[in-house]
Image: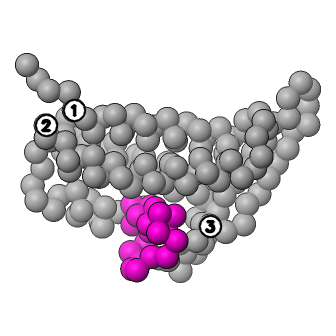
Amino acid sequence: MVKARKYQEQFDRLKRWYGRFEKIDQGRPHTVASDYYIDEIYAFFINCYHLKDWIQNDETVRLPQGKIEHFVHQNECMRVCKDICNGIKHLKRKSYSGGDPEFGPRKFSLDLGEPTTIIKVKYSIITKTGTIDAFQLASECLQRWKEFIKRNII
C-alpha cells in the first residue's frame, strides 16, 4: 500500500492561499477591514516558503541531500519569498538572500456598485534591485514549486 504524500496537504494549502491572494489582486467583495488583506498576503508567503519543510519531512519523498535548498537558492523569487517569510515570522532578519525585501506602497481600487463594493489591492515589494509586484512574485513562486514537484517528486 502506497503512503499518502503529506507534503501535498501543504501544497494544496498554498494553492488555496494563492487563490485568496488572486481575489485581492483581481477584485473581491470588500467585506472586511483592509488589514485583513495583508494578513492573507503574509499567509501566502509563509506557506509558500515552508512547503520546502513539508517536502523535506515527508517520508515518502526521496530527494538528494541539499536538493530543495539548492532549488530555493537558485530561484530569485524563492529567495525573496524566504526573506519575506522570515521577516514576517521574526520581525528582523539575520541575513538576506533575496535583496532585502520590504512591502512598499499599496494601491487600492474600489468599485462602489450595488449590491457589494468590490476592492482590488495591488501590493508592491521593494528590493535592492527594484520594485516587484507582490502578486506577480507569488505567481512565479507557485509556478516554480509546480515545476520542482513535477521534475523531482511526481
**For mark 3, what is the residue?**
103
Q: Indicate the secondary structure of the residue bearing disc 3.
A: strand
Residue drawn at (78%, 36%) of the image: 31
Q: Which sits in the foreground, 5 or 151? A: 5
The reply to whether residue 141 is visible in this rendering is: no
Q: Indicate the secondary structure of the residue bearing disc 1.
A: loop
Is 23 above or below relative to 76? above
**For mark 2, what is the residue?**
60
Residue 78 position, x and y percent, is 39, 60
Quarter residue 154 falls in: top left
Tell which circle, 2 or 3, labels the residue nearer the N-terminal end.
Answer: 2
Residue 66 position, x and y percent, is 15, 62
Residue 127 position, x and y percent, is 55, 75
Amino acid type at image mark 3: Phe
**For mark 1, what is the residue?**
5
Q: Is residue 131 left or right of residue 79?
A: right
Q: Outermost residue toward the top? A: 1
How many marks overall?
3
Tell which circle, 1 or 2, labels the residue nearer the N-terminal end.
Answer: 1
Amino acid type at image mark 1: Arg
Quarter residue 61 falls in: top left
Question: Magenta part of the protein: which range?
Answer: 78-98
Q: Given contact means CB atoms under 8 Å apart, are the residues at marks 1 and 2 in contact? A: yes
Residue drawn at (47%, 69%) of the image: 90
Is residue 89 located in the magenta-colored stretch of the structure?
yes
Q: Is residue 113 left or right of residue 133?
A: right
Q: CA distance from mark 2 to mark 3?
A: 36 Å
Q: Quadrant of the N terminus?
A: top left
Label 2 neighbour load within 10 Å: few <14, some 14-19, many 20+: some
